[in-house]
Image (cartoon, rainbow, N blue to C red):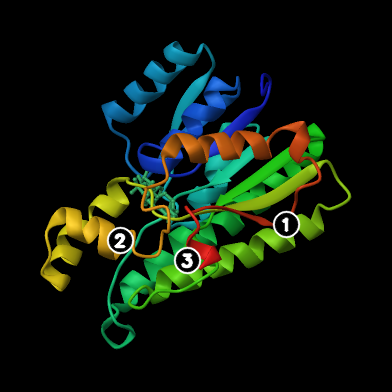
Amino acid sequence: TLKGKTAVVTGSNSGIGLGVARSLAEAGASVVLNSFTDNAEDHDLAREMAKEFGTEVRYIKADMSKADECRALIEQAGACDILVNNAGIQHVAPIDEFPTEKWDAIIAINLNSAFHTTAAALPLMRKAGWGRVVNIASAHGLTASPYKSAYVAAKHGIVGFTKVTALETAQEPITANAICPGYVLTPLVEAQIPDTMEKYDMGREEVIKTIMLERQPSKEFATVEQLGGTAVFLCSDSAAQITGTTISVDGGWTAL
Ligand code: NAD
């Protein structure tokens, strides 16, 4: 059980982040939800989760593209035993047409934010005498696809950063690992379907099976619940000697 632990999950008002936050709450952790918005729905989501799981759930607004807001998120959380760096965006374009502002935003949100939150969280973990850093990388942290230059660079970067975090905490009761999902059907992936349908002149089902899941041998999307379960495992005592590595949840993608 994760009772008494506080988990901060960046980018967690939808998709994988929300799924991981729900699994951690179900396991008993107090949870801090986050995104860059500050809508009534964000706070409602926290209230509903608190009621559903009988644990403390707060929503803290912070824009993960901004260094000071990343650090402020951890400071406002007050405690951070479990840090899940999940916030991420995607943009698909050939390198010579890739907009500079998209490149900068992807590197800031998908990579730099993890540096800032980790830097702010490690002192709190050391004070508490226990910590878990779980970075949501991607199969694209281990392999590449055309037209995803910024995303692949950021995800390879976060896998490297995870290893350094593990080495700097190796002799402490702190671990750092990266989960590498293949395709998970979330708003981020859903948003890529219309563009991909147009690009390949295909229908929705054909795009899903032959393009999106082309490299996922299982031909099934992974689920946010499976990713949540993997995160909870990494927070368990069984995983205390698992550090500095990646766990693929990709239906065999990286075995190809
Ligand atoms: P999503 O769009 O559903 O969720 C992204 C989350 O990040 C949202 O909560 C969004 O509000 C938040 N976010 C975006 N910009 C932010 C910012 N500037 N500050 C704070 N929060 C911000 O997408 P998802 O598929 O759930 O993706 C979550 C993570 O999982 C990402 O890092 C993504 O790269 C990774 N991932 C997703 C898949 C997939 O198939 N969906 C596969 C591999 C890795």
Q: Is residue 19 left or right of residue 128?
A: left
Label disc, if present, on residue 212 of the rendered structure = 2
Query: Of 212 and 20, which appears nearest the observer?
Result: 212
Please state the horizontal and vertical placement of residue 203, each as a whole percent of the image: 11, 59
The CA distance from mark 1 to mark 3 is 17 Å
Position of the N terminus, as image quadrant, is top right
Q: Secondary structure at mark 1?
A: loop
In front: 128, or 3?
Answer: 3
Ranked by sequence position, the earlier of labels 3 and 2 is: 3
Residues at discs 1 and 2 in contact (Cβ within 8 Å): no
Identify the residue at image location x=36%, y=53%: 219
Circle 2 sits in a helix, a strand or a loop, which is it? helix
Q: Quadrant of residue 164?
A: bottom right
Q: Position of residue 256 (x, y in %)?
A: 50, 68
Q: Is residue 26 above or below residue 192?
A: above
- Give the Cα separation between the discs numbered 3 and 2: 13 Å
Residue named by callout 1: 244
Residue kind at label 2, given as amino acid type: Met
Residue highlighted by disc 3: 140
Labelled pair 1, 3 in contact (Cβ < 8 Å):
no
Q: Mark 2 or mark 1, which is nearer the start of the sequence?
A: 2
At 37% from the left and 73% from the top, the residue drawn is: 148
Task: Assess disc 1: are there few (<14), some (14-19) or many (≥20) residues with their C-alpha within 10 Å of its C-alpha.
Answer: many
Residue 49 seen: yes
For image coordinates 67% across by 19% down, the residue present is: 3
Q: Is residue 238 above or below residue 189?
A: above
